[in-house]
Amino acid sequence: MDTKLYYSISEISEQFDVSKSLIRFWETEFSILNPRKNSKGERRFTKKDIEDFRIIYHLVKEKGFTLEGAKKEIDQNKERIKQKFQILANLKIIKVHFEAQRDDLIK
């Protein structure tokens, strides 16, 4: 289990395969994305920030929303979108569990 509290912009950039400049740009465009900054001014993302970034990424990069369209969708449906991501995460856990059971049966 990951016990990290904060993630760097580099880690987020790698995780989503996007540039750091895109992350900084989206931070200015989307009010839900508001990472803390340390004394050096370096961004520190919490798990909540990553969840919010994932919503933006999903709408813009995967669904093809414009920035304005994504902002509107987030304003109107943020909780529904978060629930959808939680359901998908739970389904992935269940899938891994069943795959492990299948592999045990095959042995």
Image (tube, rainbow, N blue to C red):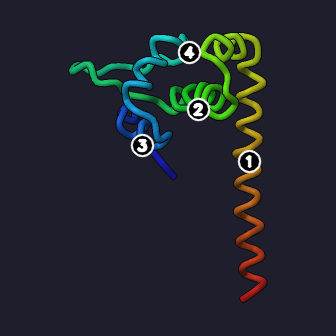
Q: Which amino acid does label 1 sit on?
A: Asn
- For the view shown, which residue lies furthest in the bottom direction? 107
The residue nearer to you, when weighing 75 against 19, is 19
3 or 4: tag closer to the N-terminus:
3
Query: Is residue 7 left or right of 77 when viewed as pictured?
Result: left
Kindly report the distance in space between the C-alpha atoms of the residues bearing marks 2 and 3: 13 Å
Kindly report the distance in space between the C-alpha atoms of the residues bearing marks 3 and 4: 21 Å
4 or 1: tag closer to the N-terminus:
4
Question: What element does badge 4 sit on?
Answer: loop
Q: Residue at x 70, y 62 (%)?
A: 96
Question: Residues at badges 4 and 1 in contact (C-beta under 8 Å)?
Answer: no
Residue of label 3: 14
Q: Position of residue 69 (x, y in %)?
A: 68, 14
Q: Which amino acid does label 4 sit on?
A: Ile
2 or 3: tag closer to the N-terminus:
3
Residue of label 2: 54
Q: Where is residue 40 in the image (x, y as percent from the top left)?
A: 21, 21
Question: What element does badge 3 sit on?
Answer: helix
The residue nearer to you, when weighing 66 against 88, is 66
Residue of label 1: 90
